[in-house]
Amino acid sequence: KRADIIVTNPGKVIYKDYLGIYGDTVIIDHGLGLGSLYAHTSSINVEVGNEVKTGDKIGNTGATGAVFGDHLHFGMLVQGIEVNPNEWLDNEWIKVNLTKTINDAIKIMNGNSNETKNISK
């Protein structure tokens, strides 16, 4: 009970308040539309606007909101929509689904790819 809540990735605290069934919640913006949510906390040690880094303690687990006992609800948000957080903690999934796609897009934007197409037709 009351376990430490440790940040998974660096970012900026954009929300610290009671959030309905989630209870006392912190949301961290990681940029590019990606955020992490830490809910049902018993204590929160950060403020909106704080920059946090991987490994920082931001609070403790708790039983606020609609819960039956002490725990942490961890979520990942993409453009504000909650998605499966397990994928975002899997380096291989990130490499296959994000890193390659982003790098390919950068190559196309920089004109370093023969696969560019004229989509204006």
Image (cartoon, rainbow, N blue to C red):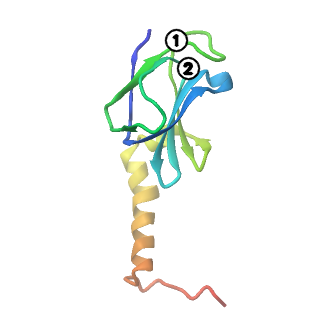
Nearer to me, 48 or 105: 48
Q: Which label's residue is closer to the chain start, 2 or 1? A: 2
Residue type highlighted by circle 1:
Asp
Q: Which residue is under mark 1?
A: 70
Which element is circle 1 on? loop
Q: Which mark is residue 40?
A: 2
Query: Would residue 67 appear left or right of 62 to someone viewing this image?
Result: right
Which element is circle 2 on? loop
Give x and y (percent) for residue 55.
31, 32
Nearer to me, 3 or 14: 14
Label 2–label 1 contact, CB within 8 A: yes
Quadrant occupied by the C terminus: bottom right
In front: label 2 or label 1: 2
x 42%, y 40%: residue: 89
User: Would you call the spot at circle 2 few (<14 residues within 10 Å), some (14-19), or many (20 or more)?
Assistant: many
Query: Would residue 12 appear left or right of 81 to someone viewing this image?
Result: left
User: Would you call the spot at circle 1 few (<14 residues within 10 Å), some (14-19), or many (20 or more)?
Assistant: some
Q: Is residue 113 above or below residue 3?
A: below
Nearer to me, 112 or 90: 112
